Amino acid sequence: MVNIAELRAAMARKEITQKALAKAIGMTEQTLCRRMKQKRFGTEEAEKISTVLELRDPAEIFFSRK
């Protein structure tokens, strides 16, 4: 399950909006919002997000037990 609080924190640290992140990973803002609400991302999406946000340990966000 995706830790949305940590994902939002990573976005804040990089000063990137939801709209900008969606554009950077090639999806609409609505789709990103829906995926965040569902707490589900595909492997390729998680990889793209990790790259854009320069995540050191993506597992903390994308494989959270919270």
Image (cartoon, rainbow, N blue to C red):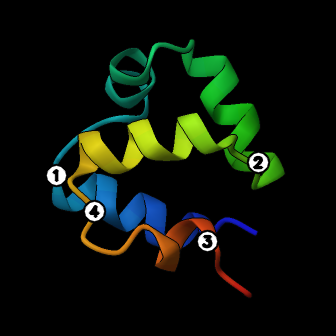
- Residue farthest to the bottom, as pictured: 65
For label 1, the SS is loop
Decide: few, some or many residues near mark 4? Use Cα within 10 Å; few <14, some 14-19, many ≥20: some
Q: Nearer the viewer, mark 2 or mark 3?
A: 3
For label 2, the SS is helix
Determine contact: label 2, label 3, CB under 8 Å.
no
The residue indicated by pointer 2 is 37
Task: Give the alpha-carbon distance from disc 2 to disc 4, as whole Å.
Answer: 21 Å
Query: Up-down: is 31 above or below 9?
Result: above
Q: Quadrant of the C terminus?
A: bottom right
Q: Nearer the viewer, mark 3 or mark 4?
A: 4
Decide: few, some or many residues near mark 1? Use Cα within 10 Å; few <14, some 14-19, many ≥20: few
Task: Give the alpha-carbon distance from disc 2 to disc 3, as whole Å.
Answer: 11 Å
The residue indicated by pointer 4 is 55
Determine contact: label 1, label 4, CB under 8 Å.
no
The residue indicated by pointer 1 is 14
- Residue farthest to the right, as pictured: 38
User: Position of 58 compared to 13: left or right?
Assistant: right
Task: Give the amino acid at mark 1.
Answer: Lys
Q: Earlier in the sequence, mark 3 or mark 1?
A: 3
Q: Position of residue 20 (x, y in %)?
A: 32, 24
Q: Position of residue 37 (x, y in %)?
A: 76, 48
Q: Earlier in the sequence, mark 1 or mark 4?
A: 1
Determine contact: label 3, label 1, CB under 8 Å.
no
Task: Give the alpha-carbon distance from disc 3 to disc 1, as whole Å.
Answer: 17 Å
For label 3, the SS is loop
Task: Give the amino acid at mark 2.
Answer: Lys
Task: Give the amino acid at mark 4.
Answer: Leu
Decide: few, some or many residues near mark 3? Use Cα within 10 Å; few <14, some 14-19, many ≥20: some
Task: Give the alpha-carbon distance from disc 3 to disc 4, as whole Å.
Answer: 13 Å
Task: Give the alpha-carbon distance from disc 1 to disc 4, as whole Å.
Answer: 10 Å
Query: Up-down: is 65 above or below 19?
Result: below
